[in-house]
Image (tube, coloured by chain):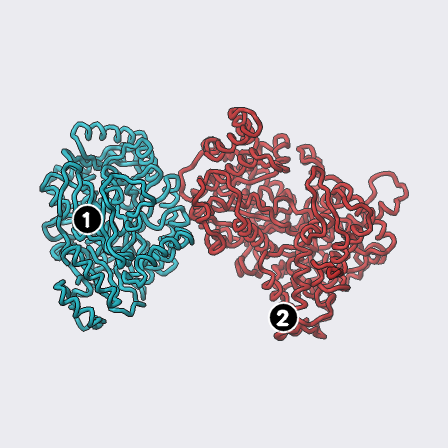
Amino acid sequence: MTHTYRGSGRAGLYQDEEFMDILEERRRTSDLGHALRSFKPLPYLGAPPCSVAELNQAVLDSHFLRHVAREVAMETGSSVEEVREEACGILEEMSQNLQLGFIRLMGYALTKVLKRLFTSVFVNMEGLSTLQQAMQQTRVILMPNHRSYVDFLVISYIMFTYDLPVPVIAAGIPLAGMKLIGEILRRSGAFFIRRAIGSDKLYWAVLSEYVKTIVRKEFAPMEFYVEGLRSRTLKSVTPKLGMMHMVLEPYFKGEVFDITLVPVSISYDRVLEESLLAHELLGVPKPKESTTGLLKASKLLQDNYGSMHVNFGQPVSVRQLCEGKINRCQYNLIPRDLPQKPTPEAQACVSWLAHLIVRIQEEGSVISPWSLMACLLLQAPVAVLTEDGLPWQQLTERTLWLKRLALDFGGHLKWPGQVSDSDVMSSSAAIHHSVVHQKAGRVYLVQEEEPERRRAVSAEQSVMRTGTSVLMLASYRNQSLHVFVRPALLTTALDVTNSTHKDELFAFFSFLQDLFSSEFIFIPGKLSEDFEEACSLLKKCGAVHIDQQEVTLSHMGRETLSFLKALIQPFIDSYQMMFRYFCEQGAQVITEKQFLPAVRTLATKLLLSGELHTYEALSSDTQKNVLSALQRLEAVTKMRSMQCEYKVNKPAVRRIADILSGKIPVQMLRTPPDARL
Amino acid sequence: MKWNGWGYSDTRFLFNKKGQAEFTGKRYRLSGLIIPGLKDWMEGTFGASVQHKSQATPILNSSSVQPPNLNEAFVEELKSTGVPYSHDAEDRVFRAHDCHDDVVKIVELACKHNVCLIPYGGGTSVSSALECPPEETRSIVSLDTSQMNRILWIDEKNLTAHVEAGIVGQDLERLLNESGYCTGHEPDSMEFSSLGGWVATRASGMKKNIYGNIEDLVVHMKMVTPRGVIEKSCQGPRMSTGPDIHHFILGSEGTLGVVTEVTMKIRPMPEYQKYGSVVFPNFEQGVACLREIAKQRCAPASVRLMDNEQFKFGHALKPQVSSIFTSFVDGLKKFYITKFKGFDPNRLCVATLLFEGNRDRVLQHEKQVYDIAAKFGGLAAGEDNGQRGYMLTFVIAYLRDLGMDYYVIGESFETSVPWDRVLDMCRNVKARIVHECKERGVQFPPLSTCRVTQTYDAGACVYFYFAFNYRGLSDPVHVYEQVEHAAREEILASGGSLSHHHGVGKLRKAWMRETISNVGMGMLQSVKDYVDPANIFGNRNLL
């Protein structure tokens, strides 16, 4: 019997997909046998295979790279040969070296690791078979979200298991630096990209030509993380556009007929790096990727991480999506292999498409019962969680209520059917013993044990300890945030404006989207649809009545509305706290280096004094998001200098803070109150 | 001539009683022969069946045509000039003067009575240029130039001939040949298209590599416009006298006036002609070879590269072989190419060549071209294949009529494109056609094929053929139009031009503004406004 269950799906995903546990067969048969099985992938697009050496040679021989090399030589005063030599070196550092033998090795090792970590790895088989068809017809770009180091090779592993072409994968250069592992990854199809490329023209040129050549030559399917990096918060990250543009350009320039994007949503019951990530958000630097580090981490392998879901989304055609969004004739007048700055139209199109993919990834993510529990736990005062404990009974009742709401909102919920609801929740809590523990019918937040001497813990240290647990909890809440965020923003608008007029609510909703657009994913240009969606969801769950011009609260909706409001509250509180920092600090100009620790210190102080209630204000992710929000709203400007310096327009920051708290109307956003003087 | 199909009435494809394809008449090399492979090819390519027939309308019924909209005053005055005219039903849909002066009279009368004039030459337009605009409410006169078909003089010192613009290509060539000359201008439509039409559409001939396109051939011309006659004062071979006024006339598509007389270059007839063909392992190699030939500027009189689908099509049109020996040799060739040389029959493609000139130089030239081809994996595949390739050009339009008898509609269209985009564009457009047909419910995969027909220093001319089986579609012509429209958008998006030599007409008008920019449109419009303020030449092409 295969272990399967059904989930409910939404747009862009299969309506009623069946997941299958791919580990089940591995547990029954030999791992070595699996690794050595005859691997006969269907030919990718039926194209004659091209070797790694040929691919690299094509990159080096390209007119584009020749041209850039000449330009760079001219600018730097070195000879063209030297520059080409350098390009060769960059390519060597970057390029993958896909080999079947290593795919087998990777398959073997991954079977061991996955079996150790997870009870099941669920894959939607229908998505896989659609992918198989797509791979024979068009170029396929696999676009997974990135939540853990574990998911790096998991797609390759699935491809290997089901006889599909193994992809080449864009990876960060630190991975290449790991002894042995780097080389194994390279031979499993990874190619490596430096982190801060900045204005290194030659590097950009080699990278973009490399990516484009892979797409053009139909070398292999490509896999890359459109979010650019592992999400530290388990929330979707605003997509990065550089790589996306490189991948799409061959279509824009008519070099290929079409490109197929396949969003893949990977979700975990419990993430391996949970405490590492929380520490990183609190300012403890991330340990450098190293092989010894990896071996040390192997104690993590002893724990149970529940199950993992890999949900292959419906393939989407770039040609179809870009219809009417991009005029491909714009590339007709300049040779296509000369460097060309992307037009605003192309940039907008790339950004839109990248956001769309992230949204599809979100909708395809599987939400665990634990994520719903985390939403609710975070709404209890921290003191209750750490000291008195939350009654288990209360938590389970509320979770079941939230389950219905999540389903109403179209959430992609995984709620095992064979066991009783209370067992589901107890086992979820048990898996997350690192965050909560249950005692005498109450749930408590786990405080990180002090590793060293039993010295008295200072107040600041204790804030950090609680912060770690809260941020871990917040990460799991974030897994389901996308389901609630639109109605929650509308709820906030209803609450802050105290208005029922659709126009006013829309204006505030739009302000909130603007403010929080680094925090949550909103597809550019879809503001009105988002607002309508928020209205209809709140109406659907009976929280509001809606007619032509008015949105009025319903008595039945109090529970829903207060839940949604409380969901957004930590963000609003954190943002207000940082606005306060910007207004109160003395200098006109601040650097990013000063900013992060200073804000953290202020937050700690306010938490201790009881003025601030959310520990999420400690998160460097939130802090950076506030900085970019203020830049977007033109209250802070980045100065053209080496060390990220920012110029703060205090009245503008104050205005934003006042709008957010409802003291002044949204219309004042860009007009100073004393403009008439 | 047929009124409801291409070409001569005695010439057509049909399936005989034995179910074999046959080409009737005596005019072409293929005439009177049995073509055994055609039936299988049609069935295999389109899913068409000999059993399912949809006949063309056989005779024109005058009641099915609306009565003419006559301007009585104009007709009365026309009678007095003695210019022949007709408004019979058949003439109106098919054809309706004698010399330059007649044209001047007619244009004056048309201006006086505000009558719309549409010049008509050979009627081979494929851009809807000759369709009467439905929004036109005035009386429309089709100005048929077919009787202006004389060579007025030949200047052997300067090698020019002065010719009336109504002359049809094959007559012009035949008459010049009698004096030992030729123009060398051979568009695929040369059996029926006229000199005036060539000028009006910026035509291109198969052998342009030696003789040039129409704009290179014309030395002097006269056009009658509502403002009067436009012409140059001398026949200098090149002038620097501001923008060349010939270029207002070339490609004007009948919107400014009627071309009546043209002085064009002539050449002594070539001493020697030789056909040839080369087989390439794939289309990519073939294009690379053509590009190299263009780079070395050693293109033969004509070189055309057909893709694999067209190669197969050409194969299907091989006539029945008379001797066992020939079929044995054919089998051997096939074996050599596919088995010995390892060419994939589903990927290989063929280029046809035509060399012309002095015998020694032709042979030398031939060697040079075959040497280049060899570098790209090309194998010489014989004169016969080459010659048959060119002959097919003339019979393909007849074949379209056969297709229509069996629920298959098709058409060709062309473009020009820079060298670096040739492959991408060919692939994109062919894929788009297949994609669009599928989207629109065409039940069988369409024929979607292309060939590179001309090479230039900076690019090439590409011809697409597209046909599909329309059984099961309620409005096949509309589907056809939608697919053609999509294909053209794909051409433009892939860096191709709106047209290389067919012209814009009314079919491609929608893309003119983006093609030549607002200012460009304004320039053309202001010329039109000056030359023909009352829109007498009201066919509404181009702008």
Tag 2, which secondary structure? helix
Furthest residue in direction front, as rendered: B233
**Three-letter amino acid code at disc 1?**
Met
Residue A488 drawn at (x, y percent): 69, 63
Indicate left or right for A599 with A186 as reference: right
Question: 10 Å neighbourhood of mark 2: few (<14), some, or many (≥20)?
Answer: some
Residue A246 drawn at (x, y percent): 52, 43
Q: Which chain is depicted red?
A: A
**Three-letter amino acid code at disc 2?**
Lys
Could you say which disc has been placed on residue A540 in the image?
2
Furthest residue in direction right, as rendered: A456
Q: Quadrant of residue A87?
A: top right
Residue nearer the viewer, B375 or B445: B375
Q: Considering only vertical position in the picture, is B86 above or below B457?
A: below
Label count reads: 2
Question: Is residue B334 at all visible to an observer of this figure?
Answer: no
Residue drawn at 79 percent across, 49 percent down: A467
The residue singled out by tag 1 in the image is: B190
Q: Chain of mark 2?
A: A
Indicate left or right for B289 with A45 as reference: left
Q: Chain of mark 1?
A: B
Q: Which chain is depicted cyan?
A: B
Residue A215 drawn at (x, y percent): 47, 42
For marks 1 and 2, give the one nearer the viewer: 1
Q: Quadrant of residue A510?
A: bottom right
Q: CA distance from mark 1 to mark 2?
A: 71 Å
Indicate left or right for B279 with A610 as reference: left
